[in-house]
Amino acid sequence: MTTNIFSALSSAKLGLLAQQLAIEVTGQNIANVETEGYSRQDVTFEANTPRHAIKYGSMHQIGTGVRVAGIERAHDQFLFEQIMDEGDLTGSTEVKKEIFEQLEVLFNEGSGRSLNDALSSFFASVHDLATNARGLSERADLVSKAEHLASTFNQTGKQLYTIQRNIDSTIEAEVAEINSLTTQIGKLNESIHANEPASQYKANDLRDNRDRLVKELSKKIDIQLIEESDNQISLTLKDGTALVLKDQVFDLSTSINANNESFYDVYIDSGSATKDITSTITGGELRGYLDMRDTEVESILDKMNILSASFIQEFNGIHRAGFGIDGSSGLDFFSGLDVTVDHDVDNTGTAVVSMTNASPTTVSVDEFEIAFTGDNALGVKSFTLNNLTTNASSGTFTFNTGSTFNIKDGFAVTISGLAHAGDKVTFSVSEDAASGMSVSSTITANTNKIAAGTTTNGDGGNALLMAGLQNKLAFNSVTWSSGLGSYTFDEYYNAVVSTIGIESFSAQATLRQQEGIMLQLNSRRESISGVSIDEEMIKMIKFQQAYNASARMISVVDEMLDALNRM
């Protein structure tokens, strides 16, 4: 075989088409220079399969032009997985920073509804009453200041619960967004698999979209990525629970947890059943919302309830011992504390636990749990008592069904029905104490019943004792410890506010650190996968010149053919 003019024409045509494709890809890169998640595409050329020719008695190979070997996406998988790994911590930290900022606004001492100011004003009125125990204006002012103090507690307690409810609604929305992302990822898996059937070309734009969605998902929940052999991916939680298996998607859902204020728990549909994954989620915005709702905000609300309940109990205890100017005694100044009892919805027995506050001046304000250790049906009637506030055991008790007995300084307990081992009941006098605090209607109806005196003579001795509560060391670092504490009411409240400030600062610092890490990782990604206009312009000029040269080659071949035709 010898050379022929049409081989040259074919080589020029292939060069023309190859450079045209390269210019088209360059235009795609330039058009998407600002597209989030877009990865630069590069054309790879290779020499076309040569043909054989005999020249001067020997065999030679002659090139037949160029062909496009592939359009490659500039992508670093290791770097992408690093960005994913940092995404879940960034997402959870952003949530914590946002909610702690809300808490800082709520507890802002300059907001006009400071609890410190309300306490100070209240105790100042108590001092005024001690100076003039029979003064009607002093008594009216004390009731007014007490109502303001109760209102401040009410507002704080209700707003904390509102924050929890808002977080709960956001959790439901987050689950819906996660489902939307996993559904899109599953569909893209299917499309990529269909568009890459043993082809030399990759579905680059589809892969970019999938990576963008995976990156977005990694901020919402902790995920691990597994690359499958057929170009699809699978996504699991860090504990291995599957979210996406190629084109199969497992949806998340929410279900009310009656043991947790009827807040939502998170479940996953595994195909045959639903699985509670609330405690196994370890990162992302969803974990941040769960932690803030169930741990951080709940802890602050518990402390405010304990502060309110202990204040009511201490003040009422002194007030009961005094006398009003009408001779009345033994009355509460603030409405008394009732016991709230909650039975675990997972209990298998029929036991019903009822309680009353039999000793309003001594009963503990902590939250407790009764965990039944014996089975009534087997004749074993016993339970352990755990202090949930201090995380300490309060002992083991036996009981007789239907009989009333006292525990923890004043809880009068009656247990009826059959309890099974493992059944649980929680109780407390401080639940909702902050949002429910109020001045006794008996006092507001008749201020003469305010027990300012230690006798019926109208002295202010008892008012002085009540005023002394302002400096009484009534708290340890966790809860109320009347007479044995290290902190006053003000100091305990200030510690709560300080904790919010410290946690908020910590969240901000962690977020700044994460933002710095993400900035570095994204900058590295841009240097590898991003589009540089200057580089693309250089490529465009190079491909344009190569295209013109191929076109010129066709013109030369055309002239050669004309020369042959004229022969």
Image (cartoon, grey):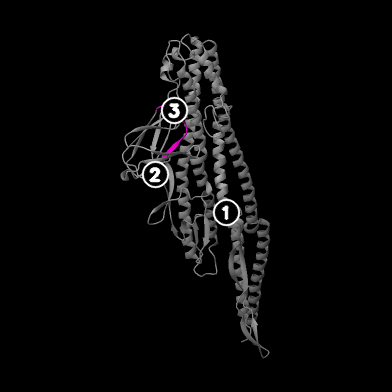
Secondary structure beneath label 2: loop
Work out whether 300 lies above or below 220.
above
State the CA–CA distance, disc 2 to disc 1. 44 Å
Residue hosting label 1: 85
Which stretch is magenta? 358-372
Image quadrant where residue 555 sits: bottom right
Give the percent coordinates (x, y) of residue 240. 49, 57
- Residue 260 horizontal side relative to residue 541, left or right: left
Q: Earlier in the sequence, mark 3 or mark 2?
A: 2
Secondary structure beneath label 3: helix
User: Which corner quadrant holds the C terminus?
Assistant: bottom right
Q: What is the chief secondary structure element of the magenta stretch?
A: loop
Give the percent coordinates (x, y) of residue 486. 58, 29
Res. 114 in view: no
Whether residue 202 is in magenta: the answer is no
Work out whether 55 lies above or below 335.
below
User: Which corner quadrant holds the N terminus?
Assistant: bottom right
* Circle number at residue 373: 2
State the CA–CA distance, disc 3 to disc 2. 34 Å
Q: The disc labelled 1 sits on which kind of residue?
A: Asp
Give the percent coordinates (x, y) of residue 446. 42, 13
Marks 2/1 in contact by CB < 8 Å: the verdict is no
Secondary structure beneath label 1: helix
State the CA–CA distance, disc 1 to disc 3. 44 Å
* Circle number at residue 436: 3
